Image: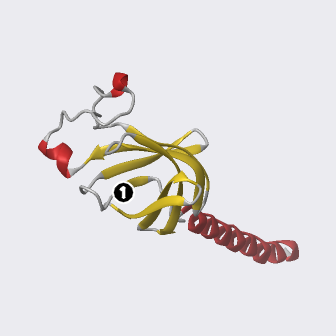
Amino acid sequence: MTARLFALPLMIAGLAMAGAAALAASALAAEPSPVGVWKTPEDHGLIRIYECGTALCGRIIGSDTLNANPGLKDAGNKDAALRGRPLKDLQLMSGFKGGPKTWKDGRIYRPQDGGTYKGSLELVDGNRLKLTGCAAPLLCQSQMWVRAK
């Protein structure tokens, strides 16, 4: 009987520790991620960022221009063979590695000028993402994207 009395507090303590560990794990799982849909400042673009293997990638899912002309093509591409591909669902980001707040060594395609740039992502907070593209080491431009609701 005495052994059972001592076992009960140990079981309760064990359950409490397991509960605390589960709460800590769920808090870590709830950490903000760039995976999701983001609004760009240009043309109210919507970009879906998703995991592609061990990296992050992104596709165009919409914009004001695409809403007005859903069949718009990648006419500004420097490669003439690619100018007929649709802009909707076009992959424009690839290879971003790192995390949980900063991803580097990615590639960003910009349909407006047909250029592909080296890029990085910085998750400022759960609703703001800073995207930086560089044509050369000191020739960079950044945009702040906001999470789409």
* Residue 128 in which image quadrant: bottom left
Identify the residue shown where x is 61% and y is 43%.
54
> According to the image, label 1 marks what residue?
38
- Which one is nearer the viewer's eye here, 111 or 90? 111
Amino acid type assigned to the residue bearing label 1 in the image: Trp
* Residue 75 in which image quadrant: top left
Identify the residue shown where x is 42% and y is 42%.
115
Identify the residue shown where x is 35% and y is 36%.
90
- In-image side of 50 versus 54 (left or right): left
- Which one is nearer the viewer's eye here, 8 or 100? 100
Q: Residue furthest top?
A: 81
**In this view, 19 is above or below 37:** below
- Which one is nearer the viewer's eye here, 11 or 39? 39
- In-image side of 137 versus 59 (left or right): right
> How many numbered callouts?
1
Identify the residue shown where x is 24% and y is 55%.
43
* Residue 144 in which image quadrant: bottom left
Local secondary structure at mark 1? strand
Residue 95, x across and y down, in percent: 56, 43
